[in-house]
Image (cartoon, rainbow, N blue to C red):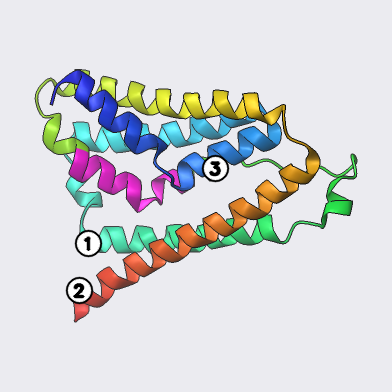
Amino acid sequence: MNFISIFIVAYVGAITPGPDILLVLHNTLRFGFLQGLKVFSGIASGWVIFLCFIYFGFIHVLSGYIAQSIIGVVGGLYLIYISYLLFKKQDSKMEFNENIEYMPDTYLKALFINLSNPKAILFFSTIIVPFIEDNLVVNIFVLFCALCSAFLSVIILAVFFRNLLNKQIFYMIDKLCSIIFFIFAIMLLYHSLSIIYNLYD
C-alpha cells in the first residue's frame, strides 16, 4: 500500500462515526475551536500510544480476544456514564440561564475514550498493520497526519456551523449525543460479551 492509499484509508477510517469523532464534534459545537482542539489532543495522544505499539511490534497484545473483551467492557461502561451525564442535564429553561455553564470534556477523558475504544484497536491491528511494514517510520507518520487531518476537518466544519446554531439546538445536540453514546456503549458491550461467551462456550 503506497502513501496515498494509507492516507485515504486512515482519513476515511477516522471520520467514520465513532465515540472519538463524536466527542470532538460535540465539544467543538458546544464550546468552540479551542475546546475541540483540547479534546482532539487527548485522542491524538491515544493514537501515539497505539502507534508506539505498532512500531515496537506489540499491537498483537491489544488485538487479542481477552484484551479486546476487557477494553470493550470498560469502554462500554464509561460511554454509558458519559451518556447519563449528558442526558440528565437540566431542562432547557435552566440550561439557557447564562450563569449556568455545562463543563466541557477534558484531555484525560478524551484520552481514556480513545484507549478504551476497540474500534481503534481493530483499525490499527487489522487494517493498518499488514500494509505498513515497509518504510515503517514514514508510513506511521503518514498515518498520523491522515488521522489528524480528518479530525481537524471536522473541527473546522463544526466551528463554521456552530455560528448558525442557537441554544435550543445546543440543548438538542447534547441529548442526541447522549443517545448516540448509549448506542455505541451497547454495541461495545454486546461485542465484548459475545467474545467472552465464545471463549468459554
Decide which of tag 2 and tag 3 comes sooner along the chain.
3
Tell me which segment is drawn in magenta.
Answer: 113-127
Secondary element at tag 1: helix
In the rendered image, which quarter is residue 192 located in? bottom left
Marks 1 and 2 close (CB-CB < 8 Å): yes
The three-letter amino acid code for the residue at tag 2 is Leu
Outermost residue toward the front in this view: 164
Front residue of 185/115: it is 185
Decide: few, some or many residues near mark 3? Use Cα within 10 Å; few <14, some 14-19, many ≥20: many
> Residue at label 2?
199
- Residue 116 in magenta? yes
The three-letter amino acid code for the residue at tag 3 is Leu
Indicate left or right for 56 with 111 as reference: left
In the rendered view of the protein, which quadrant contains the C terminus?
A: bottom left
Marks 3 and 1 close (CB-CB < 8 Å): no
Measured as percent of width and height from the top left, residue 193 is found at 33, 72
In the rendered image of this protein, does residue 133 appear above or below residue 127?
above
Front residue of 168/41: it is 168
Instruction: Identify the residue shown where x is 9% and y is 24%.
Output: 134
Instruction: Identify the residue shown where x is 83% and y is 53%.
Output: 92
In the rendered image, which quarter is residue 164 located in? top right
- Number of marks in the rendered image: 3
Front residue of 149/139: it is 149
> Residue at label 3?
23
Indicate left or right for 18 with 128 as reference: right
Measured as percent of width and height from the top left, residue 109 is found at 55, 45
> Residue at label 1?
65
